[in-house]
Image (cartoon, coloured by chain):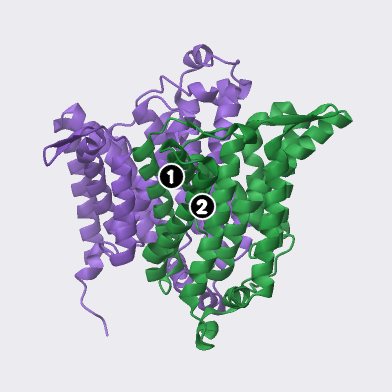
């Protein structure tokens, strides 16, 4: 691999890693506060992309469609929490997980019924699909935009988590929900904030994904969601910086392994799974994570 | 002694019923109840890890695929194999694998149980719900491998001309065996340890339950019977492709065990029959309909929307399902105190 190909793959890796990172943040925040693997999170990303598609096809300009997509995803995310997860806060964990998988399956099939299962071309505007040349390497404009926006968003999320009183409440919830309630914090309100933040980031990730791989289908969220969860575990579930780190590691691995060993291309989607197994075997708390349950193993 | 006689009589009656149905039903009805029987085997074993041991897992489609491929490779005659592998020549070991149907089923079950053991080591070492996500991922990985190793699985073309051994006598008998094994596990010390683990893991550890061992045992037993169910499915369908073993299969089974009651094997049997017929009868939902005089378009996937809503509603309002975690016979027992 010569240097220019290396650079080319590097920017591709950064861009793919950013998308995984954005989705992984939502997983890690919900798991951190509720200890729930939100199976529907990957599908929220799909909802975001489809709402943008819908908004553009009724004639809204693209930037407004993006806002519609993000707000719509936040609404769906918060609604799933209110309708499906909140009544089960005190129920056995398995009920919550079954409901989460039910929601995920419901969203996939609802969009399948509404839009049909055939992949649709994503209506990205031309100024986002152009590319420019830097020496020998061709850089699509999105490859620059995605990491920049991701870093900005990460800064925002970290600011909210560590500098505001809402962030303090979120971090406190991660330790002990009953005690936080006793301290007079409205736990349900804080959980709503967690779901809104996570869903908004998932929608942004979904829109980036749809622009970069310009087609969308109702099942697109499953495999990306699975990979983002693996990224969150790799970085240390419960840690936001860890989720971003895990997302980048996964993104780079996928791009570089396929670039170096093209014959492994068919197994690209399996790398995340092996990362997950390796992390569970050797360092279950991930790279940045603390031991959430202080387990004995 | 009395309960033993009842048991033997029940088994004899079920076997008689199976042979009676096999001889007297039309082939359409027979294939329907074979389908339900296979679903019952899968759901019974799925309920062991999910309902009895309380470890949320999404594995059936992966293990069913392993069992199906394993059994199919063993029972397809060598000449057929030589013709069938279109993309590349079959690997030499594939040609050597030849066995009769029971051995092939057993091989499928053992292969699944072995993979389950390999997965248990990383997953059960840590606390938390990693089993769910690892098994969900595993279902996808199996598909990726089946697609990408044409010399073993014939890639996306799948395996065809699998001999059709799986008649209702086979399937019905294995339903009975699975049911009996599950009931025996539930009432054994392993079953009690699983229930303790489900209800309170810390308390179970404090009582000296080796949770890693119990979880692994439950997971491997589930995988074993899912592998056998997969083998039956392969022989019943006579053709398998990687795309048949998607998450949809797991989802059907999840609905069955949730409706029947997590932890109740009799509930699972009842729910498998209800859902099995329901899926067949609700096929009209996917096609065009006339509702209040309005004609709607065909909506493939509408059944799935309704089933997922059914699952969520059951979880929210009737979490215990049909029988809760009790068996049918326990409802007739007098309280002992």
Give the residue at the far left of this rendering. B293
> How packed is label 1: few (under 14 Cα within 10 Å), some, or many (20 or more)?
many
Q: Which residue is mark 2?
A: A70
Which percent across, then down, holds residue A288? 74, 63
* Residue A132 position (above or below residue A55): above
**What is the residue that sits farthest to the right in this orientation?**
A3
Specify the quadrant that holds the N terminus of chain A: top right
Chain coloured green in this rendering: A
Spatial separation of the CA atoms under disc 2 and disc 1: 41 Å
Is B48 on the left or on the right of A202, as rendered?
A: left
Which one is in front in this view, the residue at disc 2 or the one at disc 1?
2
Same chain under badges 2 and 1? The reply is no
Q: What chain is colored purple?
A: B
Q: Residues within 10 Å of mark 2 (few under 14, many from 20)?
A: many
Classify residue A211 by image quadrant: top right
Q: Is residue A159 left or right of residue B120?
A: right
Find residue B170 and report its horizontal and vertical position in percent. 31, 36
> What's the chain of the residue with tag 2?
A
Helix, strand, or loop for circle 2?
Answer: helix
**Chain under numbered label 1:** B
Name which residue lies at 26% across and 64% down.
B323
Would residue B184 be seen by someone viewing this image from the given angle?
yes
**Would residue B96 appear left or right of A118 to someone viewing this image?**
right
Q: Position of residue A227 (x, y in %)?
A: 61, 47
Q: Nearer the viewer, residue B167 or A30?
A: A30
Residue at the spot 68% in from the left edge and 68% down from the top edge = A159
**Which x, y percent locates residue B209?**
54, 72
Q: Which residue is mark 1?
A: B226
Residue A11, numbered circle: none
Q: Which residue is drawn at the image coordinates 48% and 74% (left, top)?
A: A189
């Amino acid at each position: 691999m010569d240097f220019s190909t290396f650079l080319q793959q590097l920017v591709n890796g950064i861009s793919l890693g950013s998308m995984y990172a954005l989705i992984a943040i939502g997983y890690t925040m919900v798991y951190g506060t509720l200890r729930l693997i939100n199976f529907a999170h990957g599908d929220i990303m799909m909802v975001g992309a489809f709402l943008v598609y819908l908004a553009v096809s009724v004639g809204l300009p693209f930037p407004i469609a993006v806002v519609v997509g993000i707000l719509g995803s936040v609404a769906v995310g918060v609604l799933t929490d209110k309708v499906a997860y909140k009544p089960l806060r005190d129920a056995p964990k398995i009920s919550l997980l079954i409901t989460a998988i039910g929601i995920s399956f419901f969203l996939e099939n609802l969009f399948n019924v509404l839009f049909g299962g055939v992949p649709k071309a994503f209506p990205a505007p031309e100024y986002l699909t152009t590319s420019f040349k830097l020496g020998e390497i061709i850089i699509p404009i999105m490859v620059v935009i995605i990491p920049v926006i991701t870093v900005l968003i990460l800064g925002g999320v970290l600011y909210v988590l560590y500098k505001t009183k809402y962030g303090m409440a979120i971090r406190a919830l991660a330790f002990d929900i009953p005690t936080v309630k006793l301290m007079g914090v409205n736990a349900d309100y804080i959980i709503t904030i967690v779901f809104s933040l996570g869903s908004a980031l998932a929608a942004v990730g979904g829109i980036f994904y749809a622009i970069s791989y310009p087609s969308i289908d109702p099942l697109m969220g499953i495999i990306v969601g699975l990979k983002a969860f693996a990224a969150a575990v790799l970085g240390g579930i419960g840690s936001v910086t860890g989720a971003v780190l895990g997302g980048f590691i996964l993104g780079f691995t996928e791009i570089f392994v396929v670039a170096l060993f093209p014959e492994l291309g068919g197994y690209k989607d399996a790398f995340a799974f092996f990362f997950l197994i390796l992390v569970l075997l050797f360092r279950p708390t991930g790279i940045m994570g603390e031991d959430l349950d202080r387990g004995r193993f | 002694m009395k309960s033993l006689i009842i048991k033997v009589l029940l088994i004899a009656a079920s076997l008689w019923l199976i042979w009676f149905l096999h001889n007297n039903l039309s082939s359409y009805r027979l294939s329907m109840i074979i389908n339900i029987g296979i679903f019952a085997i899968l759901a019974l074993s799925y309920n062991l890890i999910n309902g009895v041991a309380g470890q949320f897992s999404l594995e059936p489609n992966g293990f069913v695929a392993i069992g199906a491929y394993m059994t199919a490779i063993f029972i397809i005659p060598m000449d057929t194999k030589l013709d069938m592998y279109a993309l590349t020549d079959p690997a030499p070991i594939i040609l050597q694998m030849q066995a009769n149907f029971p051995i092939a089923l057993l091989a499928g079950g053992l292969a699944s149980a072995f993979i389950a053991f390999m997965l248990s080591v990383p997953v059960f070492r840590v606390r938390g719900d990693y089993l769910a996500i690892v098994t969900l991922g595993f279902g996808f990985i199996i598909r990726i491998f089946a697609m990408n190793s044409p010399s073993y699985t014939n890639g996306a073309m799948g395996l065809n001309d699998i001999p059709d051994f799986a008649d209702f006598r086979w399937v019905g008998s294995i339903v009975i065996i699975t049911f009996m094994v599950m009931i025996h596990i539930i009432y054994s010390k392993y079953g009690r340890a699983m229930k303790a683990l489900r209800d309170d893991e810390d308390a179970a550890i404090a009582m000296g339950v080796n949770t890693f061992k119990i979880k692994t045992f439950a997971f491997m037993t589930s995988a074993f019977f899912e592998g056998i169910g997969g083998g039956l499915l392969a022989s019943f369908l006579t053709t398998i492709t990687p795309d048949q073993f998607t998450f949809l299969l797991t989802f059907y089974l999840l609905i069955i065990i949730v409706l029947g009651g997590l932890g109740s094997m009799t509930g699972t049997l009842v729910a498998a029959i209800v859902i099995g017929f329901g899926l067949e009868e609700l096929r009209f939902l996917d096609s065009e309909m006339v509702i209040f005089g309005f004609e709607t378009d065909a909506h493939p996937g509408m059944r799935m929307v309704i089933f997922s809503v059914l699952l969520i509603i059951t979880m929210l309002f009737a979490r215990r399902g049909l029988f809760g975690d009790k068996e049918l016979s326990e409802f007739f027992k007098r309280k002992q105190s």
